[in-house]
Image (cartoon, rainbow, N blue to C red):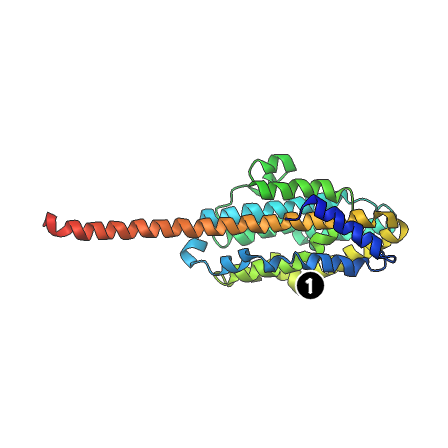
Amino acid sequence: MGTRDGIIHEIWDYSDSESDGVEDFPSAMIALLDKHRPSRMPFFRRLASLPLRVVSEPDFLGEIHLVYQAAMHATRAAVYYLPHLDSPALRKRKLQIFIDDDGLAGGDTHHYQLTRAFRNIGANIRLTDEEFGSPEELCRHLDPETAHFVRLAQRLYSRSLGPWCAVEVMSVDWMRALAEAFSAHFPQFIHEPYFEDCFSHHVEERHADEALAVSKMVLQQRPELLAETMRDARMMAEALDGVWNNLDRVVEEARRRAGGFERRGLMLIVNRMMMGPKLA
Ligand SMILES: [Fe+2]
């Protein structure tokens, strides 16, 4: 994770060197976020290479669900507080984003879809859907890195449009990486509505385009917000790296636990074989 000093220095450089910064905003944002592309993180490939008996363990799946759902919940809740989008035309565009998450056919939501996808592969769900509420309450159930992401989403989404851009630009990458990693073990997983609806309708690509386009419109009116927008996007992206790092630890701990059980099992067999002739 970069230092605060590092962040400030790079933003200073960016503002200084780019006289037409707002015109370049979408490409500068994409370049910034490319360094944080979620699929580059070890979590996804290590998840795909876990033995099936480890990845099928209900408590392990429940832990992955809790962390991932908590991070997603934080951004879905925070998007309702986005600033600068108050004109009727911009409220309409914001509303479409809400509908894509929380206004699905038949009263469904992305949150419910995701929980069903995990239940269908056998997860022991730790928090029921409606227990995902206020950030502070939720953080009591989370590791420090995911809790940091949840708190940061609440704070940053309401002060600039950068974090929203960061999440929307990167989301299709991590959704594909997650779907493909789990589908190595559970082929149906990638066909769950949470993934398939998004992929087939290019929902996240549309959100990315929309977040960048709307933010650029705001910045054209208020170019003084550019540095803050870029800084907040970077902070969000760094915090998201922390979520993947934590999930990677969950995977490695599950692998170690399974290795420990195997060694103990092997020792028991060896001991019995050694004791056998003496008892006979
Ligand atoms: Fe989205």
Q: Position of residue 221 (x, y in %)?
A: 90, 51
Number of residue marks: 1
How crowded pointer 1 is (Cα within 10 Å; few <14, some 14-19, many 20+) is rated as few
Q: Vertical placement of 222 versus 138: above or below?
A: below
Q: Nearer the viewer, residue 207 or 37?
A: 37
| Residue that mark 1 sits on | 201
Question: What residue appears at the point 71 percent right and 53 percent down from the top-left corner?
Answer: 166
Q: Nearer the viewer, residue 84 or 190?
A: 84
Q: In the shown orientation, is residue 59 left or right of residue 208? A: left
Position of 50 compared to 147: left or right?
left
Q: Is residue 240 above or below residue 131?
A: below
**In x, y percent, where is residue 178?**
57, 58
Question: Mark 1 falls on what kind of element?
Answer: helix
Residue at 45% from the left image edge and 55% from the top image edge: 55
Residue 10, percent from left and from top: 75, 51
Q: Is residue 102 visible?
A: no
Left or right placement of residue 210 versus residue 250 in this view: right
Q: Is residue 9 visible?
A: yes
Residue at mark 1: C-beta within 8 A of ligand 1: no
Seen at 88% across and 53% down, the residue is 220
Q: Quadrant of residue 151?
A: top right
Which quarter holds ligand 1?
bottom right
Residue 136: name its quadrant.
top right
**Residue 172 screen position, x and y as percent:** 66, 59
**In this rendering, is residue 233 above or below 26?**
above
**Seen from this angle, which residue lies furthest right?**
221
Instruction: Name which residue type carries label 1.
Output: His
